[in-house]
Amino acid sequence: MLTTRFLNDQLRETLSKRRSENGFELADVLRSGTENPDSNIGAYAGDASCYEVFSELFDQVIEAYHGYTPDQQHYEQFEPLAADSVGKLNLADPRIISTRIRVGRNIKDYPFPPSISHASRLTLEAKIATILNQLTVDQKGRYYSLSQMSDSEQRELTEQHYLFKKGDRFLESAGVNRDWPSGRGIFYTAEKKFLVWVNEEDHLRIISMQQGGAIATVYERLRQAVLTIGAELPFARNNRLGYLCSCPTNLGTAMRASVHIKLPRLGQSEELANICKSLNLSVRGIHGEHSESKDDIWDISNTQRLGISEIEVIKTLFQGVKSLLQEEDR
């Protein structure tokens, strides 16, 4: 666990005297790791100020995880793709089953899910729902509060991988599951190519997805939606770390761009993980971290999120997937 590597007695004593803007203490930051010693990171931010108030700890965790030093500056380039790039970044290969790009966002001046009160979560949900219900992304959509959905409706959406579940033991310990399911919900369009999760690990998970390898199309849909939502609800961010999320693994672009891809030959090889690593990509099964492949289908995504622009994330995925397909054909 990264926090135990850096948190010596002297630093613990220093940080124990501090409080974030919303009263988050060091014990709150560390609670998930304290209760779950098998955590990879072991720390969650309760609000945007935590990254400054407890910077002596977070900076070391961020450098170890992201390879990003305290003197670096994150830069943003969430811009339209150049006209001559759009067609080139859409891959028409039947082995690419689907493409999904998402970003995490928290709303400026609100506590993050590990520390937000029940009343504030409900207030924020209402604000977000109003904005989402006015949004047009390809098609109109609708916001559904989990508290008003039947168990069967929730189960169906979850089994189809559209809806999030109650958080695991790590998020439970972090405080993210408090008052579940009140104040949580999902927005989606008719064809479910665009979705927004509300008040899960972060205030927003904004998701664009569709069948096939249309990476540029999926990116542009997401970009336009994020721009529209952010104009109404400014996001928590700072110049050094970019967009701020509850977990320090999810900073900077806070973007995960991925494809589900069929790799019968490479999938049988122990080299797949090494090849992906050389391409700055991560590989996992289609049911999430630590899951196995099914029918030779793998989830391939960008590794870097901090210190890289949004456009660079997309191009890294595109070039990497092209290289994997070429390697598969050898």
Image (spheres, rainbow, N blue to C red):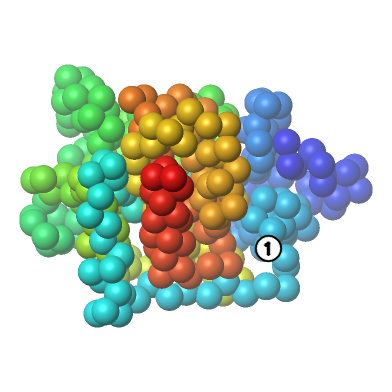
Tell me if residue 242 comes above or below residue 9 in the rendering: below
> 51 or 219: which is nearer to us?
219
Q: Is residue 239 left or right of residue 89?
A: right
- Say left or right for 133 vs 235: left
34 or 289: which is nearer to us?
289
Residue occupied by mark 1: 68
The number of numbered badges drawn on the structure is 1
For the question of whether residue 101 can be seen, the reply is: yes
Residue 139: quarter of image? bottom left
Indicate the position of residue 51 as horizontal and vertical percent values.
Answer: 64, 59
In the rendered view, tell whether residue 136 sits above or below residue 272. below
Please name the residue shown 31% across and 49% down the image. Answer: 100
> Residue 170: horizontal and vertical position, in percent?
56, 30
The furthest residue to the bottom: 83
Amino acid beneath label 1: Tyr
Q: Position of residue 137 (x, y in %)?
A: 15, 60
Residue 182 visible from this viewpoint: no
* Residue plotted at (79% across, 38% down): 4
Badge 1 marks a residue whose secondary structure is: loop
Q: Nearer the viewer, residue 84 or 40?
A: 84
